[in-house]
């Protein structure tokens, strides 16, 4: 329809206010016109009556041929017929002329500009006929005059009434077109439903939303969530304060608003406004999925996993929890890049998902740490699940070593406590070497608390100067001269005494305190080397640096700042690292930059870790240190002596010096000197002591065997 509204067949006619009037007027006027034509044909009045009768019939025929046409021709024809009939007929018959004139005005709805002309023409014709009839009469009868004037008054009044009606209809149609255009342009589906739920008026958007069809119009309805038409729902859909969300036959999710429409006659109707919220719901679902799912692995996100954990603790008396931490993810990430690391995490997530039992939920807590929730799992079942997960991680083409901590809540424990217990068990598994499962025990919690206290105390020690540096001499085996000293950190812990590095370096590595701790040792050692130089002893200093320190992006700037602040020449500083540095690409890049800056690099504990000739060839070292586990066997194990000779020869080929550690006897020193070892350190030459009490000797003497 031109208004943009679609009516149903039953209600279309009832909303046309002039339809019945036009129909009755046309029928009545047609009878009057036929009577007028008959009078013209059969009454005496000369030859003019025949053309007039034909004209009447032609005008009447135009009603059916051109029902909507009402122009100048019809207006002139009306005037001619009205005036001619008054002249030709033997007696004035104004009623017939009036009725015929009314028929020509039946279609007067195309515009008000034609109406005054038509009215004037009709009135003029009627007056002409009336005046002619009166002038031919021998005597004017007042009754006849009144009979002629009264229809005239009726014609005038009817003309103005019709004019107002037509004008009102025009206003209504304009309003309907305007409102219809607005309703058609709106994205909201609008419909008026009768008491049965059948739409009686709707826009095209409603038709599209609800999937309505003309051939099944009576079956078209607006559904509700309860499976009935919305007007017949007894669960409050029709009178709900807010929108009711339904799924339409067209597959759309619609928010439907309803409201009553009172009718003067008959049952009330219902107006329905439907908004398509499908995209909004899809967007909300995508947001929920994004919030609930880890974007990389597809497992439950940390926030969602914690929410599910809290719900499980509320619903189940027993809840098992696994914390899974990958043992070598950092190595993969550093060696092969972040993309390879991401693929590694995806593969781990797939393994976890495939190992889950019914009811279990896997999530990623962050980085390379995963978790598995097992609601209703007893201790034995949870441990069995953890072992199954570990087997799955190690059973594929690529082995994913992991440390798994297991904790089981048997009532009373909150989510934070359960997570803490599983995390504690996981760290125990990691400290024991990794790639194993550990069930949380109460003593682990006590150990964790003690470890937390140690961590706090160690941080305090770094900040308050409780750390002290001891120095052990390194001796040239050929001359006996003390050439340098290795800086070894100690912790003067209040209430405990002096602690060696084995008691706290692991904790520092684990907690990240190794970075500020290492910086303190480096500053102290460099400053002491400068002091010795000022005292006339040109001694170098060796500082142990962990792989974690080297891989830290701030290591090189800190090193440069310490050298600049203390004034130590780079050539008098030796950075000592272990073989684990080879597995850390960022640390190796830092080490290369250190050597390029003129600082010497020593490889500690050679032969006990990731020893590889290719690494020695790719990354040259200035010093190779022979671990004390080899030197202790000197004189007792021929194979060990052979290994030491090989290390010395290899270092010589690569242009590096060798330092033997753990030398306690002159015989060991003599053997190493004879084998070509460059330097040695151990209790034979001096224990590690503070700089203030360090031996002022510049050389040592030891008996020759």
Image: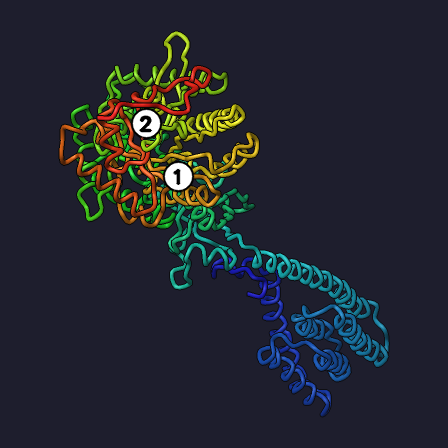
Please tell me in which quadrant of the rendered image residue 139 appears: bottom right
Q: Is residue 75 above or below residue 594?
A: below
Among the two numbered marks 1 and 2 on one chain, the one whose residue lies closer to the N terminus: 1
Residue identifier under label 1: 601
Near mark 2 (Cα within 10 A), the count class, few <14, some 14-19 or many ≥20, is many
Near mark 1 (Cα within 10 A), the count class, few <14, some 14-19 or many ≥20, is many
- Classify mark 1: helix, strand or loop: strand
User: Farthest residue toward the bottom?
Assistant: 47
Can you tell which mark lies on residue 681?
A: 2
Marks 1 and 2: which is nearer the front?
2
Residue at 32 percent of width and 36 percent of height: 678
Across and down, in percent, residue 177 comes to 62, 61
Question: Is 21 on the left-hand or right-hand side of 155?
Answer: left
Please tell me in which quadrant of the rendered image residue 581 appears: top left
Across and down, in percent, residue 379 comes to 19, 23
Of the pair 130 and 669, the residue shown nearer to us: 669
Can you tell which mark lies on residue 298?
A: none
Q: Are marks 1 and 2 in contact (CB under 8 Å)?
A: no
User: Which quadrant is home to the N terminus?
Assistant: bottom right
Of the pair 619 and 66, the residue shown nearer to us: 619
Question: Is 491 on the left-hand or right-hand side of 74?
Answer: left
Of the pair 246 and 168, the residue shown nearer to us: 246
Residue at 47 percent of width and 61 percent of height: 9
Across and down, in percent, residue 399 comes to 22, 43
């Amino acid at each position: 329809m031109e208004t943009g509204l679609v009516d149903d067949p039953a209600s279309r006619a009832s909303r046309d206010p002039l339809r019945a009037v036009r129909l009755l007027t046309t029928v009545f006027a047609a009878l009057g016109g036929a009577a007028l034509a008959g009078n013209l044909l059969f009454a005496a009045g000369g030859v003019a009556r025949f053309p007039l009768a034909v004209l009447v019939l032609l005008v009447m025929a135009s009603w059916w041929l051109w029902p909507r046409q009402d122009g100048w021709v019809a207006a002139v024809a009306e005037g001619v017929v009205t005036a001619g009939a008054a002249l030709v007929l033997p007696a004035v018959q104004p009623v017939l002329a009036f009725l015929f004139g009314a028929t020509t005005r039946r279609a007067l709805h195309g515009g008000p500009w034609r109406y005054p002309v038509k009215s004037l023409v009709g009135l003029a014709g009627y007056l002409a006929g009336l005046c002619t009839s009166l002038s031919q009469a021998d005597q004017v009868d007042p009754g006849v005059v009144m009979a002629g004037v009264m229809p005239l008054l009726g014609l005038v009044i009817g003309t103005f009434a019709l004019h107002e009606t037509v004008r009102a209809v025009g206003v209504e149609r304009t309003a309907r077109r305007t409102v219809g255009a607005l309703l058609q342009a709106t994205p909201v589906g609008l419909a008026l439903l009768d008491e049965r739920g059948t739409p009686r008026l709707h826009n095209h958007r409603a038709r599209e939303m609800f999937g309505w069809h003309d051939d099944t119009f009576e079956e078209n309805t607006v559904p509700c969530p309860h499976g009935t038409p919305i007007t017949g729902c007894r669960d409050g859909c029709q009178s709900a304060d807010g929108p009711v969300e339904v799924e339409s036959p067209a597959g759309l999710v619609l928010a439907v608003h309803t409201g009553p429409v009172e009718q003067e006659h008959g049952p009330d109707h219902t107006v329905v406004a439907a908004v398509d919220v499908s995209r909004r719901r899809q967007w909300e679902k995508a947001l929920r999925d994004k919030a609930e799912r880890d974007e990389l692995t597809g497992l439950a996100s940390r926030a969602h996993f914690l929410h599910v954990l809290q719900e499980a603790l509320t619903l189940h008396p027993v809840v098992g929890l696994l914390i899974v931490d990958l043992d070598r993810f950092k190595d993969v990430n550093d060696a092969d890049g972040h993309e390879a690391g991401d693929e590694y995490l995806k593969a781990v997530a797939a393994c976890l998902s495939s190992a889950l039992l019914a009811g279990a939920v896997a999530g990623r807590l962050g980085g390379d740490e995963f978790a598995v929730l097992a609601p209703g799992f007893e201790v034995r079942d949870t441990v069995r699940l953890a072992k199954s997960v570990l087997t799955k991680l190690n059973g594929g083409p690529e082995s994913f070593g992991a440390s798994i901590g297991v904790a089981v809540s048997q009532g009373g424990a909150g989510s934070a406590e359960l997570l803490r217990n599983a995390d504690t068990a996981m760290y125990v598994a990691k400290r024991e070497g990794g790639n194993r499962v550990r069930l949380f025990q109460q003593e682990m919690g006590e150990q964790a608390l003690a470890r937390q206290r140690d961590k706090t105390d160690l941080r305090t020690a770094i900040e308050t100067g409780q750390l002290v540096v001891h120095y052990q001499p390194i001796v040239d085996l050929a001359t006996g001269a003390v050439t340098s000293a290795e800086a070894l950190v100690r912790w003067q812990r209040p209430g405990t005494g002096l602690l060696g590095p084995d008691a706290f370096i692991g904790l520092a590595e684990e907690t990240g305190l190794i970075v500020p701790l290492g910086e303190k040792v480096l500053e102290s050692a460099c400053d002491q080397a400068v002091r010795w130089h000022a005292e006339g002893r040109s001694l170098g200093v060796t500082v142990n640096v962990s792989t974690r320190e080297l891989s830290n992006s701030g290591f090189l700037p800190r090193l440069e700042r310490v050298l600049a602040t203390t004034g130590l020449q780079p050539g008098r500083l030796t950075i000592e690292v272990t073989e684990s540095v080879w597995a850390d690409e960022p640390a190796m890049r830092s080490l290369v930059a250190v050597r390029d800056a003129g600082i010497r690099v020593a490889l500690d504990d050679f032969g006990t870790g990731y020893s590889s000739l290719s690494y020695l060839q790719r990354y040259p070292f200035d010093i190779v240190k022979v671990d004390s586990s080899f030197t202790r066997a000197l004189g007792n194990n021929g194979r060990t002596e052979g290994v030491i000779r090989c290390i010395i020869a290899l270092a010589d080929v690569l242009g590096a010096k060798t330092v033997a550690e753990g030398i306690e006897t002159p015989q060991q020193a003599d053997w190493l000197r004879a084998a070509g070892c460059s330097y040695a350190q151990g209790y034979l030459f001096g224990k590690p002591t503070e700089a203030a009490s360090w031996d002022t000797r510049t050389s040592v003497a030891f008996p020759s065997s």
